[in-house]
């Protein structure tokens, strides 16, 4: 089974050391039995010495070769691990903050390669030859100028073997096990077994979806047997969809939820602009510069040639008969959106949900201290670009040339052009303007334990870039909720 390390997903692939070069022995032939015996003893002694040198060199003479530009520290450690068989332990922050490197290491010993790799990164290393493990950490502030003397003091590691089962003793596959505070780790196999290298005082976090997570302190132990209990809390979680709720494990529909912290910011005059570009498959476009123009909303693409393609909009549980009515709601009063994109919407709302459903929830008052909010913005709109057009003289010259090219006489062409008069108006600039708009929203909320109230007053004055197009509105929104009969009745 493959084992993981305590830094970002760098696997351990143990590589056996290369075979040493054969030792050649020579000796003169001797006819005497004593000489033969001494010769055999010499062979034995040389072989024993070669074996000892082989064992000693196998941990330190495994050289590293890397030639790359703009390579990450994580990738560099992975290449060294594959070439040497050494495992690496480091904090996940080290990998994320390390800059990319340009390396040219050729047949260098492990320690030399590490010095070249970590130089300039303010990182220290410590090699554990016995366990073939390398620890990497930040240099102490007092030793930044002495890399060789800055190897961090690290705890010894242990090789942990464990077995994970459920409450009935059945092995659990795919259980995640890692040392607390790190991202590296391992998972159990088909038999519920796992193997992990970790510091002997580490705390292991053991978790899997549907079961209660556990934290176990190793305290130097190398054998573990873990039993996980079913998590009723996760299985009983519910999600609000449409008019009711559904258990999370039974919900298979495509539902996107967007809360106020994820809304688009800026000059938002229509609530739907708050989620423009936030939901995959949801298209919201402004058809023109007229502020009274309704936004075009498409949730499932073009589905009909003649019928309505706008999704059903449900405001605080009430379906709107006309989707354009949502533009009368102040964006500052919106709390969240839930977008239902697949067939589950039709199961709840029938044929009205054929184009998808957008559920909008407005802000509600909270019990406790009185809260006052004021939101406002002022905007300037203008035409981004005008099309280049001809003035009167340029148009007259072009028209004369065209009419003459068709065979018309000069007098006839001039008479034809003369019928248009002497107008010289650029209608693009004549009917457009720089538009000024303002929006104000004042809300007050509060309440006691049983009665909550939220009211908001809004004013909008939005000019269009086209003359005589504008939108003005004054709105009042009031939401009162009272709990009666020992909180059994909501009014």
Image (spheres, rainbow, N blue to C red):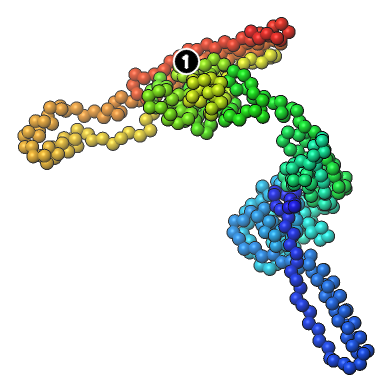
The image shows residue 282 at horizontal and vertical percentages of: 49, 30
Q: Is residue 121 above or below residue 429?
A: below
Q: Residue 242 or 414: which is nearer the viewer?
A: 242
Residue 138 in view of the camera: no
Q: Is residue 439 above or below residue 99?
A: above
Q: Residue 203 or 34: which is nearer the viewer?
A: 34
The image shows residue 344 at horizontal and vertical percentages of: 56, 26
Judging by the rendered image, the residue that carries numbered circle 1 is 321
The image shows residue 138 at horizontal and vertical percentages of: 74, 51
Residue 212 in view of the camera: yes
Q: Residue at x 64, y 8 (%)?
A: 491
Q: Is residue 450 above or below residue 222?
A: above
Compared across the picture, whether 141 is left or right of 390 comes to: right
The residue lying furthest to the bottom in this view is: 31
The image shows residue 202 at horizontal and vertical percentages of: 82, 45
Q: Residue at x 33, y 25 (%)?
A: 432
Q: Residue at x 72, y 29 (%)?
A: 234
How packed mark 1 is, by other alpha carbons closer than 10 Å (few <14, some 14-19, many 20 or more), is few
The residue lying furthest to the top in this view is: 485
Q: Quadrant of residue 366?
A: top right
Q: Of helix, strand and loop, which one carries label 1?
A: loop
């Amino acid at each position: 089974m493959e084992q993981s390390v305590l830094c970002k997903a760098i696997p351990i692939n143990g590589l056996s050391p290369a075979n040493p070069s054969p030792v050649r022995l020579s000796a003169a032939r001797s006819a005497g039995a004593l000489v033969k015996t001494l010769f055999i003893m010499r062979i034995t002694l040389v072989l024993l010495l070669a074996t000892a040198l082989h064992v000693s060199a196998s941990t330190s003479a495994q050289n590293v070769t890397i030639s790359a530009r703009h390579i990450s520290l994580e990738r560099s450690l992975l290449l060294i691990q594959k070439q040497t068989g050494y495992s690496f332990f480091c904090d996940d922050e080290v990998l994320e903050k390390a800059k990319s490197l340009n390396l040219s290491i050729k047949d260098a010993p492990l320690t030399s390669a590490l010095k070249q790799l970590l130089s300039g990164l303010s990182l220290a290393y410590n090699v554990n030859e016995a366990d073939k493990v390398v620890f990497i950490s930040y240099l102490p502030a007092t030793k930044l100028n002495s890399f060789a003397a800055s190897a961090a003091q690290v705890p010894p590691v242990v090789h942990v073997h464990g077995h994970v089962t459920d409450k009935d003793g059945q092995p659990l596959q795919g259980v995640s096990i890692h040392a607390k505070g790190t991202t590296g780790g391992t998972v159990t196999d088909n038999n519920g077994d796992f193997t992990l290298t970790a510091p002997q005082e580490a705390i292991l976090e053991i978790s899997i979806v549907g079961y209660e997570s556990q934290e176990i302190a190793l305290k130097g132990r190398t054998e573990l047997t873990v039993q996980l209990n079913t998590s009723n809390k996760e299985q009983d979680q519910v999600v609000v969809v449409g008019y009711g709720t559904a258990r999370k494990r039974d919900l298979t529909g495509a539902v996107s939820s967007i809360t106020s912290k994820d809304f688009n910011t800026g000059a938002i005059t229509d609530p739907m602009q708050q989620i423009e570009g936030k939901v995959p498959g949801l298209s919201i476009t402004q058809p023109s510069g007229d502020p009274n123009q309704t936004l075009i909303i498409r949730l499932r693409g073009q589905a009909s040639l003649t019928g309505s393609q706008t999704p059903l909009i449900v405001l605080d549980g009430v379906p709107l008969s006309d989707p354009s009515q949502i533009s009368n709601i102040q964006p500052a009063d919106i709390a969240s959106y839930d977008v239902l994109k697949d067939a589950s919407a039709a199961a709840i709302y029938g044929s009205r949900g054929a184009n998808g459903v957008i559920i909008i929830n407005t802000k509600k008052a909270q019990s406790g201290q009185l809260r006052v909010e004021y939101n406002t913005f002022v905007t300037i709109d203008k035409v981004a670009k005008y099309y280049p057009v001809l003035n009167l003289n340029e148009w007259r010259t072009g028209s004369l040339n065209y009419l003459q090219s068709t065979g018309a006489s000069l007098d006839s062409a001039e008479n034809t052009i003369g019928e248009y008069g002497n107008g010289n108006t650029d209608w693009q600039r004549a009917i457009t303007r720089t538009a000024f708009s303002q929006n104000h929203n004042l809300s007050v909320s509060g309440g006691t334990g049983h009665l909550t109230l939220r009211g908001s007053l809004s004013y909008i004055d939005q000019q269009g870039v086209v003359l005589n197009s504008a939108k003005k509105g004054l709105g009042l929104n009031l939401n009162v909720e009272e709990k009666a009969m020992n909180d059994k009745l909501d009014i």
